[in-house]
């Protein structure tokens, strides 16, 4: 299994607006294509204004196919600029669990 960890730095004060948009519009679109949401988080202590969401994929090929399908969806194309306007920085990692990890 592969885990995609996406970390976004959101403009100061915009985390509630970002989360509202995702809850009301975005997460249903994402789950339609990406399916395996491990967790969706916002920072409370430490570096603030961060959103982290983690998705699981059985293979990198399947990740690529699912993300490409999401990107082609007209509803996603209309939604994405709304949250991108609230972002300052984006980071994306692909991680694999160690053999002893509970997620392996």
Image (cartoon, rainbow, N blue to C red):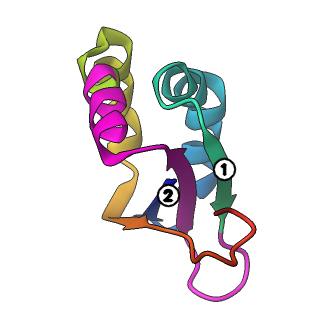
Identified at 39% across, 25% down, the residue is 79
> Label 2: how many residues lie within 10 Å, few (<14), some (14-19) or many (20+)?
many
- SS for callout 2: strand
Farthest front residue?
99
Identified at 46% across, 23% down, the residue is 33
Alpha-carbon distance for marks 2 and 1?
Answer: 9 Å
Residue 26 sits above or below residue 13 on the image = above
> Label 1: how many residues lie within 10 Å, few (<14), some (14-19) or many (20+)?
few
Farthest top residue?
74
Quarter of the rendering occupied by the C terminus: bottom right
Residue pointed to by mark 2 = 3
Q: Position of residue 72 (x, y in %)?
A: 24, 17
Specify the segment rendered in magenta. 43-69
Badge 2 vs badge 1, beta-carbon distance below 8 Å: yes
Residue 66 sits above or below residue 43 on the image = above
Q: Is residue 10 visible?
A: no
Q: Nearer the viewer, residue 4 or 53?
A: 4
Residue pointed to by mark 1 = 38
Q: Which mark is residue 104?
A: none
Q: Report if residue 75 lies within the magenta region.
A: no
Q: Position of residue 21 (x, y in %)?
A: 56, 33
Q: Is residue 45 visible?
A: yes
């Amino acid at each position: 299994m592969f885990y995609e960890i996406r970390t976004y730095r959101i403009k100061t004060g915009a985390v509630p607006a970002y989360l509202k948009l995702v809850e009301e519009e975005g997460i249903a679109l994402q789950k339609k294509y990406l399916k395996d949401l491990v967790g969706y988080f916002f920072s409370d202590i430490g570096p603030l204004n961060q959103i982290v969401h983690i998705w699981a994929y059985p293979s990198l090929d399947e990740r690529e196919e699912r993300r490409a399908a999401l990107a082609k969806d007209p509803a996603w194309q209309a939604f994405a600029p709304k949250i991108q306007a609230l972002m300052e920085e984006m980071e994306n990692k692909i991680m694999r669990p160690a053999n002893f990890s509970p997620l392996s």
